[in-house]
């Protein structure tokens, strides 16, 4: 193995996220004299501090080891506040994290909750696809909106159709401007407006001005408690309410990639159409989540001196898990550069797919005790529903370059057009 002394890249590189995007970890390895696909850790400077970038299933174990790593203070505040919200579950550790995560898992991950979501998203997706007849649609915008409408209904957030679309639209704008220099002020503005709205909604529920449906996500988030059993403040509860709805809207990015994949893999489109169950559409959705870029990387901080593959990691040092490099590694996947949903056909459901340690499109480790997204089952349900709908023979997906190409240097990326689509007949 290459010695860790040769895996250091001098200079500050946090700004390179804006120019290199998803390619940054591989580019840093090239600067260190390593092959870009190397699984060796590499250390450089992020925000003036040492940061070690790791990838692969061993790195997943290392990164999510709570005896070695913490989340508090790891993500730069300017990023964390915009993306997940101040004080969100993603930033917590220890008992605070376990208590908060258990309440969110109960809302989003349990099969009964997912079963409540499934018919709602099927209805909204079908309605959106029907709207494409006679009028060109945009997969990213339209599926994001359909997913958001379903997520709000599922959560028990009862607004007028106009207000629902306005709030969902704000979440879409936040996500679509995140990581763009020119779009950052717009993303922060949307975050501020959404936090104010969600916090006020929680307060209204707590004070009886708004009636939340019993046992709804909204009702439970209004009663969200900390590790001491005390109600969390309304702003934090509102942020977590968003964290149980906004990630579903973000699946619209994957939906645009799924449209590209359907257009480029007609044999799978036919297979999905002729299938008697959703096994094929789910496998297709999972491969979309593995193959196409989404979350580029995520940070933690070492809570004590340790090492990874011979590379020393000191207490307080950032460790960054390279999601893209892990999902595309030929040491973890057979022919990772090939789009092949067949690799997920042996897995009957999301819980089984999570047994693949390197499958981390939305985080890794155990969903109940670790930092895996509790909404993954809902995300896969939304995406596989969209896959089935877009695979219908009457759906025409544009194959022009503007609809099928995307930048690996832009975070979060997607096809520039959002993928144009129409329905014939």
Image (spheres, rainbow, N blue to C red):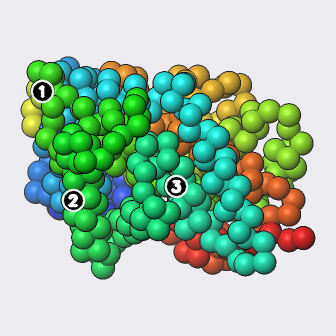
> In this orientation, which residue lies closer to the viewer: 236 or 295?
236
Q: Residue at x 78, y 72 (%)?
A: 133
The dot on residue 149 is 3
Q: Earlier in the sequence, mark 2 or mark 1?
A: 2
Relative horizontal placement of residue 57, taking residue 83 as reference (left or right):
right
x then y, percent, for residue 295: 41, 50
Left or right: 423 in relation to 411? right
The residue pinned by badge 1 equals 230
- Tell me, yes or no, if residue 300 can be seen here: no
Q: Quadrant of the C terminus?
A: bottom right
Q: Residue at the location (50% across, 63% down)?
A: 161
Q: Are marks 1 and 3 in contact (CB under 8 Å)?
A: no
x and y, in percent, of residue 409 in the image: 43, 67
How far apart, in angstroms, are the residues tagged by discs 3 and 2?
20 Å
Mark 3 vs 2, N-terminal side: 3
Circle 3 crowding by C-alpha within 10 Å: few under 14, some 14–19, many from 20? many
Q: Which mark is residue 301?
A: none
Instruction: State which tag comes first along the sequence, 1 or 3.
Output: 3
User: Is residue 349 visible in this depiction of the protein?
Assistant: yes
The CA span between labels 2 and 1 is: 22 Å
Q: Secondary structure at mark 2?
A: helix
Task: Please tell me whether mark 3 sits on a helix, a strand or a loop.
Answer: helix
At numbered mark 1, what does the secondary structure look like: helix, strand or loop? loop
């Amino acid at each position: 193995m290459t010695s860790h002394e040769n895996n250091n890249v001098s200079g500050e590189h946090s700004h390179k996220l804006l120019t290199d995007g998803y390619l940054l970890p591989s580019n840093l390895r090239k600067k260190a004299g390593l092959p870009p696909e190397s699984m060796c850790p590499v250390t450089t400077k992020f925000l003036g501090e040492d940061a070690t970038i790791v990838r692969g299933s061993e790195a997943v174990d290392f990164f999510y080891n709570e005896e070695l790593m913490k989340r508090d203070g790891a993500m730069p505040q300017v990023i964390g506040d915009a993306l997940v919200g101040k004080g969100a579950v993603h930033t917590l550790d220890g008992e605070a994290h376990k208590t908060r995560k258990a309440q969110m898992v109960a809302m989003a991950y349990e099969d009964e909750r997912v079963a409540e979501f499934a018919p709602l998203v099927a209805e909204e997706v079908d309605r959106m696809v029907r709207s494409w007849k006679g009028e060109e649609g945009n997969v990213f915008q339209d599926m994001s909106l359909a997913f958001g409408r379903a997520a709000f209904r599922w959560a028990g957030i009862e607004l007028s159709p106009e207000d629902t679309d306005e709030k969902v639209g704000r979440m879409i704008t936040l996500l679509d401007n995140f990581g763009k220099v020119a779009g950052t002020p717009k993303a922060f503005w949307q975050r501020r407006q959404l936090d104010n709205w969600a916090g006020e909604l929680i307060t209204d529920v707590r004070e009886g001005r708004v009636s939340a449906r019993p046992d709804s996500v909204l009702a439970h988030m209004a009663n969200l408690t900390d590790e001491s059993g005390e109600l969390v403040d309304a702003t934090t509860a509102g942020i977590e309410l968003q964290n149980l709805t906004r990630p579903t809207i973000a699946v619209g990015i994957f939906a645009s990639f799924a449209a590209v994949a359907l257009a480029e893999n007609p044999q799978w489109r036919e297979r999905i159409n002729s299938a008697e169950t959703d096994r094929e559409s789910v496998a297709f959705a999972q491969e979309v989540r593995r193959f196409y870029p989404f979350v580029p990387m995520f940070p933690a901080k070492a809570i004590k001196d340790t090492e990874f593959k011979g590379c020393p990691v000191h207490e307080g040092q950032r460790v960054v898990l390279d999601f893209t490099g892990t999902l595309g590694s030929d040491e973890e996947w057979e022919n990772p550069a090939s789009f092949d949903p067949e690799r997920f056909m042996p897995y009957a459901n999301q819980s089984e797919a999570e047994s693949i340690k390197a499958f981390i499109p939305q985080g890794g480790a155990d969903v109940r005790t670790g930092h895996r997204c509790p909404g993954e089952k809902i995300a896969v349900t939304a995406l596989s529903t969209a896959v089935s709908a877009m695979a219908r023979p009457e759906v025409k997906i544009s194959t022009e370059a503007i609809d099928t190409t995307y930048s690996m240097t832009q975070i979060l990326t997607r096809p520039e057009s959002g993928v144009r689509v129409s329905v014939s007949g």
